Amino acid sequence: MAINLQKGQRVDLTKGNPGLSKILVGLGWDPVQTKSGGGILSSLFGGGGGPNIDCDASVIMLGENDKLKNNKDVVYFGNLKSNDGSIQHTGDNLTGDGDGDDEQILIDLNKIPTTIQKLVFIVNIYDCVKRKQHFGMIENAFIRIVNSANNQEIIHFNLTENYSGKTSLVVGEIYRNGDDWKFAAVGTGTTAPGLSEIVRSYA
């Protein structure tokens, strides 16, 4: 049974799951459906659905004092694999349509270098300023962690706040706690216009 978390909660990841090393982190979201009956709006946005919003999931690998040591420690659609091979992004999803995960990140906790203390999971809207898009146009956002060995969901966190006006989300964190790993449900929205601005805040 997955543990359903609320914003701000922290939970053991490896302590209660002995031998856990390979995990899948799934992130999902849906465009808010517009109730237009057709016409210009409908043709602009491709039928009865919401606008085409391209959300991107990323992982920032942080060292001591929550600092980014190297830009290659950012795993996203432009850098799908970490240098050490511990993190692999499965690729970009351009629309958020459909059920289930929209983007997935595969992690081998045992391969993460000891210099890395924390993994921060970010979702931001690609080209949000030009497209005038924000997370008020997105619903049903979540992050979940699955044990890759048996496909069992361990942790699930639904982001239920109103993120209107926010253009990026710090969704959650996996961090070291002694010899173990823990997960924190963060769910904080920011107005950073893109991933590079978020990354800079950890420099």
Image (cartoon, grey):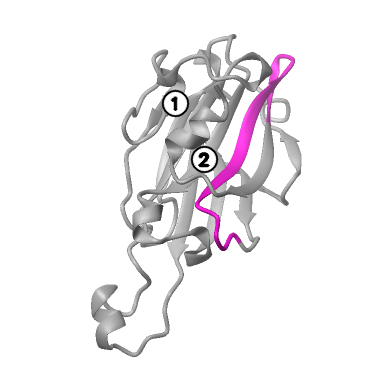
Label 2 residue SS:
strand
Classify residue 45 by image quadrant. bottom left
In this view of the protein, which residue sits in the foreground, 48 or 190? 190
User: Which residue is pictured at 65% across the width and 25% down the height?
Assistant: 175
Which region of the structure is painted magenta?
Answer: 163-182
In this view of the protein, which residue sits in the foreground, 17 or 84? 84
Label 1 residue SS:
strand
Classify residue 58 by image quadrant. top left
Q: Quadrant of the C terminus?
A: top right
In the image: residue 124, left or right of residue 181: left
Q: Is residue 167 magenta?
A: yes
User: Which residue is pictured at 69% across the width and 37% down the height?
Assistant: 184
Q: Residues within 10 Å of mark 2 (few under 14, many from 20)?
A: many
In this view of the protein, which residue sits in the foreground, 2 or 169? 169
Q: Residue furthest front?
A: 130
Q: Residues within 10 Å of mark 1 (few under 14, many from 20)?
A: many
In the image: residue 88, left or right of residue 164: left
Does the image show residue 191?
yes
Q: Is residue 93 above or below residue 181?
A: below
Does the image show residue 151?
no
User: Which residue is pictured at 44% across the width and 55% down the height?
Assistant: 100
Residue type at mark 1: give it.
Answer: Val
**Residue 101, horizontal then vertical, whole percent:** 44, 50
**Residue 91, horizontal then vertical, whole percent:** 32, 39
In the image: residue 29, left or right of residue 158: left
Mark 2 sits on what residue? 122
**Residue 167, horizontal then vertical, whole percent:** 50, 52
Q: Is residue 92 magenta?
A: no
Mark 1 sits on what residue? 74
Is the Cβ of the residue at disc 1 closer than 8 Å to that at disc 2? no
**Residue 191, horizontal then vertical, whole percent:** 54, 49
